[in-house]
Image (spheres, grey):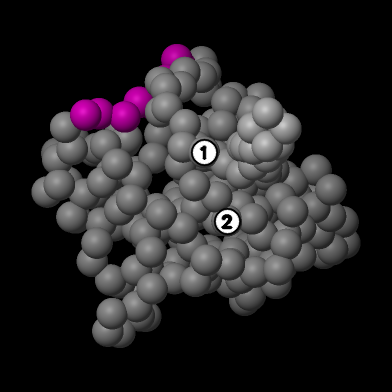
Amino acid sequence: MSRILAAATLAVAFSATHAVPQQAQQVSFSFNGQELSISRQISVNQAKAARFSVTQDGCSGLCLAPISAGTGVATIGEMEVTKFLVDYTQAGTGLLIDARLPTARSDGFLPTSVNVPHQAVEDGNPYRNQILSALGAREYDGILNFSDAMDLVIFDAGPSDSRALKLIENLLSAGYPPEKLRFYRGGMQVWASLGLNFVEQTQ
């Protein structure tokens, strides 16, 4: 009996310290006065998902993005993205940032996301501080203060893309706090391949 109790105790301790897959429930939230939702479809249109698999923007050959986007920057998955939408985007304290160019974004994008290509916050861009101010930074005599800056989830086409990494690198170089940045490495490719809904621009 003691062995059975010990085994049961071990099993409970293991389940308490190890993550297990969760049921993908529909997530509803408000954004700019609109009620939106994220849900997973049983049937996945792989042709739509495939449009995000093209390697672009400075990566020649078969490239893969690393798991880590930088020291202190969290890498997150789909469940964390949906939780961010509820906890931060709905509250007006966070944004989903699409690091692709507008031409690539026309293939589809995550609901509520805004387009900030990595080039927009490169050092030397005369509008960089204005863009950072729109993200919540405050500028005094040319010096940026990020204490009130928004929390950001940054994504691009997916694991074979490098634009989210470049945007994060540029934000960190500008002084953006790493704890306010999250890297969704899966991007549009993984999001679409899992059957999660996204916005498609009408022609």
Residue 2, percent across and down? 72, 32
- Give the vertical position of 157 relative to 95 (above or below): below
Mark 1: few/some/many CA within 10 Å (<14, 14-19, 20+):
few
Task: Report the amino acid beneath label 2.
Answer: Thr
The residue sitting at 41% across, 54% down in the picture is 186
Residue depicted at x 68% and y 28%: 1
Q: Is residue 50 left or right of residue 116?
A: left
- In the picture, the quarter occupied by the C terminus is top left
What numbered label is drawn on residue 75?
Answer: 2
SS at circle 1:
loop
At label 2, counting other C-alpha atoms closer than 10 Å, the crowd grade (few under 14, some 14-19, many 20 or more) is some
Question: Measured along the vertical axis of the image, is residue 159 above or below residue 150?
Answer: below
- In the rendered image, residue 104 lying in the magenta stretch gets the answer no
- Return the x and y of residue 100 as percentages of the image width and height: 39, 59
Question: Can you give x and y, in whole percent of width and height, for residue 47 in the image?
Answer: 12, 48
Measured in 3D between alpha carbons, the distance from the residue under mark 1 to the one under mark 2, in whole angstroms, is 18 Å
Q: As drawn, is 155 to the left or to the right of 42?
A: right
Task: Give the label, 1 or 2, closer to the camera.
Answer: 1
Residue drawn 55% across the image and 50% down it: 76
Q: Amino acid at mark 1?
A: Val
Instruction: Name the disc covering residue 20, or none.
Output: 1
Q: Magenta residues?
A: 34-42
Residue 28's tag is none
